[in-house]
Image (cartoon, rainbow, N blue to C red):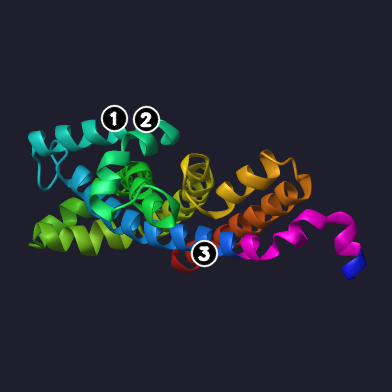
Amino acid sequence: MLELLEKYIPNLLDYSSEFFNSIGETLQMLFLSGIFSFIIGLFLGTLLVVTRKENILENAVIHKVLDGMVNIFRSIPFVILITALIPLTKLIVGTFIGVKGAIFPLVVGCTPFFIRQVDMALSDIDNGLIEAAQSMGLSPAGIIFRVYLKESIPALARSTTITTISLLGLTAMGGAVGGGGLGSFVIRYGHNRFYQDITYVSVIVILIFVTIIQFIGNIIIKKTTH
């Protein structure tokens, strides 16, 4: 077995400890930035929906400002965004390189995408349900939690799955500009030193991550769909 590995992935074996460390860094970036993006995105996405015209908390100013901010940040390519945020990242977390320096830009880059996903999920709620809840005397907070969020759980699970897979791609992209993880590992060895075995195995690992995320997402969607 060892002979087979030495034949097909000799360079990866030489840097195996760094390879596994890079996997850990990728998971760390995905987990932490994913949690922050989910919380912030869910809150702002819900706010975007309920402040829309003729909705339960209609507010044109808040809606237009939030909608404009989402469109602006979504239009900036992540490689440019992470570079533009370097001064702010350094001010907030003390460094702009490595895992620590990548999490803040990842949250800024991913959250607008998730806000729009939440917007689409909650906008599909039948207006009849909203009107029924209002006629029953539910408060705006009650409508948000008992109608919008409760009825949108399968759609939100689907949106979260899509966003998590996109976030995984951003963590790899962050490696091009100083972030850690598999992206940085592949650039240093797979690209700069042309160690193809490192590139191929890293791609397989990313594919496994995507498959696991999609599998978990599908289970949650299936369990919550009624």
Reading the image, the residue beneath label 1 is: 72
Q: Give how far apart the Cα atoms at labels 2 and 1 are.
A: 7 Å
132 or 68, which lies in front?
68
Q: Give how far apart the Cα atoms at labels 2 and 3 are.
A: 34 Å
Reading the image, the residue beneath label 2 is: 76
Q: Position of residue 220 (x, y in %)?
A: 48, 66
Q: Relative to 41, say whether 139 is above or below.
A: below
- Cβ–Cβ below 8 Å for labels 2 and 1? yes
Q: Position of residue 54 (x, y in %)?
A: 12, 38
Which label's residue is closer to the chain start, 2 or 3?
A: 2
Residue stretch in magenta: 4-20
Task: Check residue 6 for magenta coloring.
Answer: yes
> Identity of the amino acid at label 3?
Lys
Numbered-mark total: 3
Reading the image, the residue beneath label 3 is: 222
Question: Residue 186 has which mark?
Answer: none
Q: Residue at x 36, y 29 (%)?
A: 75
Q: Say whether residue 126 is visible.
A: no
Q: Relative to 158, say whether 105 is above or below.
A: above
For this view, does 24 lie left or right of residue 70? right
Q: Residues within 10 Å of mark 1 (few under 14, many from 20)?
A: few
